[in-house]
Image: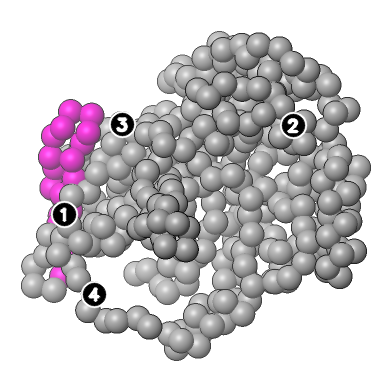
Amino acid sequence: MLTRSTFIRASSLPQRQQSFGPFELCLFAHPAPLAELGSTSAHDEAEEPCVVYLQDLGGLNKNTMQLDSRMWRGLLHPTLMTLIVHASLIAAVPRSYSNHTPSTQPDYVIIGGGPAGFVLAEELSKKRNITVLLLEAGPENAGVKAIDVPGFAPQLLQTPYTWNYTCQPDPNLEGNTPLLHQGRGFGGGTAVNYLGACRGAPSVFDGWADISGDDGLRWENFLNDYKSTMHFAEETLDYDPHVNTSVYGDGPIELTAPDDNLGFVLQLVSSFMSALGLPWVDLNDGTGLGVTTSVNTIRSSNRTRDFASQAFGWQLAGRSNARQLYNSEVTKIGFEGTRAASVTYVDHGDNSTHTLRPKEIIVAAGALNSPKVGANTAIICHKKFD
C-alpha cells in the first residue's frame, strides 16, 4: 500500500542519465563558425568514441540559440578562452526497455514519466513481487544533446520534447499569451528545464498544511523527502557558494554549485547584497529571502545534466518487474462504479491502442496533463477553490 509520505516524496522531487560513449567536448570562447555537433546517439552495444565541438559561443544563428556574443561572454568568463573537457559518460539508463505492450497485467500503472512517476516506479518496484509499468506520452530522449549539455537548454523549447502550451491572453501583458512549456519525454520537466534547484520557503509548505489540514505537507516533512532523493557534490571552487550541506541527503539526483570562472556574477551578487541588505544564502535550506548563485542539477564529474529518468531509470531498467514505455499516451481511464479499473493508451510508434487492467492506477502526469487525463476521462472536480 502506498503511504501518504510516498506521494509527498514523489511530488516534491524537483528533478536520468543519457547513454553516451566517451567523448571530448571542446568549448572555444573566441568567434568561430559553429561546427555541427557529432552524433552521440545511444546504442544497445558499447559505443564508439565521438567528438563534440562547440566552437562558436557567440552569434549563434536563429536555428540554434537566440543568444548573442555578449550574453555568452557573460556566461563564460573572458578568461575561459579554451576549455577542453575529457569525459567518460557511462550509460546509467540501460537501453534494455522495449516499447511493446506487456503480456501480463501489471499491479501498478503509473501515468507520466516525469520526476514523480519515476520516484514512485522506483520505490514500488523495490518489492520484486510487485509489477510496475510506467507510461510516458513523449518520445525517446536518450542521447539528445540539447538535454545533456546544460548550455543548450534553450534549444528544447517548441520541440517534440516539450508540450508547447500557451497561457490565455493576459490583459496585463497587452493581450500576449506567454509560453507555458511542459516536459514531454522521460524525466518530464527535469529533462528540459534550466537546471536550477530551489525548494521554496517553509511558509508556503506550512500554508498548504494549514489549508488542507494535512501535516504531512509541512516543510519539515518535505525536507526529509527532498533529502532522500538528492545529494550535494562538494567540489574545490575559487569562491564560497554558501551551501548548507546539512539539508542534502544521499539520494541519486546530484546537485552542484556553479563551476569556477563566474566572473562578473560574483560582482553582481556583492552589489545586490550591499544595495538590498540581503545575505548570501542557500535557498534550499528554507531560507526564503536572500541572494544566491544557486545549486544546479549538473554532475560534478562531467558537467552534464542530471535528471529524474537518469537518476532513477537505471534502477528500473535492471528490474524484471518494472517496465518503462515511451510514446505511450494515455487517452482514457476506465471506471467500474467509482473505481478506476483500466487504462487505455496509444502507442505512437505504430498507432496501436492497448487497454490494461492493473490493480492500481496512479496519475503523475504533471500540473497540466494530470487534469487533462482526467478531463478526457470525464473525471470532474466540482469543488471551487478560492
Mark 1–mark 2 distance (CA, rounded to whole Å): 49 Å
Which numbered disc covers residue 315?
A: none
Is residue 125 visible in this depiction of the protein?
A: no
Residue at figure coordinates x 61%, y 11% from the top left: 35
- N-terminal-most mark, 1 or 4: 1
Q: Which tag is nearer the camera, tag 4 or tag 2? A: 2
Which residue in the protein does label 2 denote? 70
Mark 1–mark 4 distance (CA, rounded to whole Å): 17 Å
Residue 305 locus on image (x, y percent): 60, 38
Residue at figure coordinates x 26%, y 40% from the top left: 328
Q: Residues within 10 Å of mark 4 (few under 14, many from 20)?
A: few
Is residue 194 visible in this depiction of the protein?
A: yes
Residue closest to the far left: 337
- N-terminal-most mark, 1 or 2: 2
Whether residue 274 is situated above or below residue 232 in the rendered picture = below
Element under label 3? Answer: loop
Which residue in the protein does label 1 denote? 332
Element under label 2? Answer: helix
Which numbered disc covers residue 98?
A: 3
Q: Is residue 145 left or right of residue 51?
A: left
Q: Which tag is nearer the camera, tag 1 or tag 2? A: 2
Highlighted range, magenta: 339-357
Residue 363 locus on image (x, y percent): 30, 59
Q: Mark 3 and mark 1 in contact? Answer it, CB < 8 Å.
A: no
Q: Mark 3 and mark 2 in contact? Answer it, CB < 8 Å.
A: no
Residue closest to the far front: 174
Which residue in the protein does label 4 denote? 381
